[in-house]
């Protein structure tokens, strides 16, 4: 049975991180204020990235760092979990909504991983859906329960039902599709900002899910033995849903989140999560503010 915890992750060290106007239309979590301080933002993002990798390494977590390329400029390259996912017998490449994000799908990254000894299996490219304006941005669009083979996905302009069906056929994952809205009643752009599934628990912003669908989602999670830790809308905006459970070399479960997410949690929530995994929080304010994503988006599960 596959592990829910990621035992090895890939992270991409950014070269040209910054506020991306092409993604801002569908990402309510991006903040444009001060975005013209381009060089400062790039430098701060690199510092935050390096500190995050160091914190993971200090905990014994295996991290494969990939260097972003200078050209073409890719302001979101630090978020590799949106263009690829790795499975036991295959790698899937995904259709991305923003044209400049499609440059992140680099064949040389797969070659480097293979040279490192990662068994890729078959590479399945479903990015052709871009020609039909149908998108699925990997583990941003879906939160995967590997143990129970369920894919949770809230629909948005970046998450299309037809491409979800294709993913299900390729992997055998059961789809749990629902709607979720932010405080302005706009669909939440990525499922992984409102929920995280750990080995024995699920963190989820129930407030974002319409009442008519809320109970069935909770029942799905309870069916698989997950203790539900609910988040408020404000906590979702602090990126508290954007967490990832990893496993270190000693087999210890670590729940990685940002300082922003950690500081938004109540003491009760923290103690509840600590019963399941050790919390590791990292400071990435620049990446969160201008990128509209947090630590989970920065970590792509390899194994």
Image (tube, rainbow, N blue to C red):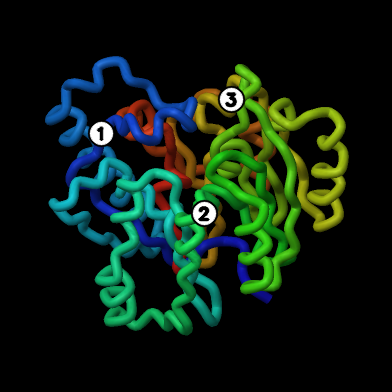
In the image, residue 245 sits, relative to residue 186, either above or below, namely: below
- Bin the neighbour count of mark 2 within 10 Å (Cα to Cα): few under 14, some 14-19, many 20 and up: few
Q: How many marks?
A: 3
- Residue that mark 1 sits on: 18
Sequence-wise first label, 3 or 2: 2
Instruction: Name the residue: 62% across, 62% down.
Output: 4
- Bin the neighbour count of mark 1 within 10 Å (Cα to Cα): few under 14, some 14-19, many 20 and up: many
Report the front residue among 225 and 160. Answer: 160
- Residue that mark 2 sits on: 132
Res 62 seen here? yes
Sequence-wise first label, 1 or 2: 1
Res 249 seen here? no
Left or right for 236, reference 112: right
Image quarter for residue 184? top right
- Residue that mark 3 sits on: 235
Circle 1 or circle 3, nearest the eye: 1
């Amino acid at each position: 049975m596959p592990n829910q915890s990621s035992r090895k992750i890939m992270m991409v060290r950014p070269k040209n991180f910054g506020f991306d106007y092409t993604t801002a239309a569908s990402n309510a979590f991006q903040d444009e204020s001060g975005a013209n301080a381009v060089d400062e933002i790039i430098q701060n993002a690199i510092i935050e990235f390096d500190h995050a990798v160091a914190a993971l390494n200090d905990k014994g977590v295996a991290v494969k760092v990939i260097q972003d390329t200078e050209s073409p400029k890719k302001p979101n390259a630090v978020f590799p979990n949106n263009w690829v996912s790795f499975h036991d017998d295959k790698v899937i490449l995904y259709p991305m909504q923003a044209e400049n994000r499609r440059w992140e799908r680099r064949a040389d990254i797969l070659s480097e991983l293979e040279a490192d000894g990662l068994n890729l299996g078959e590479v399945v490219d479903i990015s052709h859906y871009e020609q039909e304006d149908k998108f699925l941005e990997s583990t941003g669009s879906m939160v995967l329960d590997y143990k129970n083979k369920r894919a949770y996905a809230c629909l948005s302009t970046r998450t299309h039902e037809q491409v979800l069906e294709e993913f299900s056929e390729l992997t055998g994952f059961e789809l749990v599709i629902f709607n979720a809205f932010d405080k302005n009643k706009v669909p939440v752009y990525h499922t992984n900002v409102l929920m995280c599934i750990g080995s024995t628990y699920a963190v989820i912003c129930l407030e974002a899910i319409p009442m008519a669908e809320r109970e069935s989602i909770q029942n799905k999670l309870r069916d698989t033995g997950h203790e539900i830790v609910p988040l408020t809308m404000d906590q979702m905006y602090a990126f508290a849903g954007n967490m990832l459970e990893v496993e270190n070399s000693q087999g210890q479960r670590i729940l990685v989140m940002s300082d922003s997410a950690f500081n938004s949690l109540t003491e009760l929530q923290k103690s509840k999560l600590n019963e399941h995994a050790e919390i590791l929080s990292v400071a990435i304010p620049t990446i969160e503010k201008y990128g509209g994503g947090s630590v989970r988006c920065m970590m792509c599960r390899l194994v």
